[in-house]
Amino acid sequence: MTLVDITAARLSNQSDDYLINRINNDVVSNPTADNYDYDYDNCNVYENRVTSSMVYLAQTAVLCEFRHDDFEVSNPTGPSQNGLVAKWRPKERMKTGMVALVLCLNISCDPPDVIKISPCARLESWIDPFAMAPQKALDAIGKALSLHYERWQPKARYKYTLDPTVEEVKKLCNGSRRFAKTERVLFHYNGHGVPKPTANGEIWLFNKYTLYAQYIPLPISELDSWLKSPSIYVFDCSAAGNIVNAFIELIDASTSSSVKDCILLAACESHETLPQSADFPADLFTSCLTTPIQMALRW
């Protein structure tokens, strides 16, 4: 790893003329400096004789919007028991004891409300689902996603269900809560092979008792009644904001405080669709969460 002088980074915001003037002033005040040749007749500094070990970095703006400045002013560094930080910071650390993965991919059959571009994003958990048989690819993607999560939480228990029915998801959620007891349950939903969530916050699953793809809705209220709390939801699908909005309405209508002990991570807002560029994986949101280093190195 290369170490860079912090002073150099600060000086990178200054113009070259300013740096030259600084050099000239230093030489005039100290004509015996070893690093410069000074011509007293022409009052010039031979810049080609200047040597420096500092590396000048390009100017970079990071977190420079007004909301970031206000946040830093109102929240000094160090532990905080009040203010903006304390509102989301948990008082006690919560262990995630169970991870439930639900993948609704329906490989080789696109949902009716999605028009894909050509070429489009294909990779799921860094696996090309069209490079092998659909069922084999589905199994490989489920195992890969489980391993990606396991790197971050190796002590949790993992279970996944592929292109499931409502009953299979209910069984998975109830079993996850029984195993986790009072610990947190992580529920991951990949809806790339089903229609977008409805305006009422319903996600789509399958009916495997038909010869063709039939989509069955699952209200978010039922899902919450199975998983209970504490829990964390990850929704990687288009219009995921519909699910968040429905969950907020559920919290407002509920008189129990336990339902509020939930964290929701959604890939996009209710009016947005997932990116389809072939330059990125199809599960871009999931990849940023589970394999952030690989994503950063590629893009």
Image (spheres, rainbow, N blue to C red):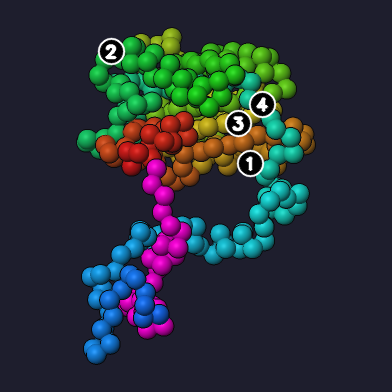
The residue stretch that appears in magenta: 1-29
- Looking at the rendered structure, the secondary structure element under dot 2 is loop
Task: Please name the residue that numbered disc 4 is placed on.
Answer: 95
Q: Quadrant of the C terminus?
A: top left
Is the residue 135 above or below the residue 75 in the image? Answer: above
Question: Mark 1 to mark 2: distance in Å?
Answer: 40 Å
Question: Mark 4 to mark 1: distance in Å?
Answer: 24 Å
Task: Please name the residue that numbered disc 3 is placed on.
Answer: 232
Please say if the residues under marks 4 and 1 sit with CB atoms less than 8 Å apart: no
Which residue is situated farthest in the bottom direction here?
Answer: 41
Quarter where residue 277 is shown: top left
Side (left or right) of 105 relative to 131? right
Side (left or right) of 242 relative to 287? right
Task: Please name the residue that numbered disc 1 is placed on.
Answer: 248
Question: Mark 3 to mark 1: distance in Å?
Answer: 14 Å
* Residue type highlighted by circle 3: Ile
Residue 13 falls within the magenta-colored stretch: yes
Dot 1 or dot 2, earlier in sequence = 2
Q: Residue at x 35, y 59 (%)?
A: 53
Dot 2 or dot 4, earlier in sequence = 4
Quarter where residue 275 is shown: top left
Task: Please name the residue that numbered disc 2 is placed on.
Answer: 133
- Bin the neighbour count of mark 1 within 10 Å (Cα to Cα): few under 14, some 14-19, many 20 and up: few
* Residue type highlighted by circle 1: Ile
- Bin the neighbour count of mark 2 within 10 Å (Cα to Cα): few under 14, some 14-19, many 20 and up: few
Is the residue 22 above or below the residue 205 in the image? Answer: below
- Looking at the rendered structure, the secondary structure element under dot 1 is helix
- Bin the neighbour count of mark 3 within 10 Å (Cα to Cα): few under 14, some 14-19, many 20 and up: some
Quarter where residue 285 is shown: top left
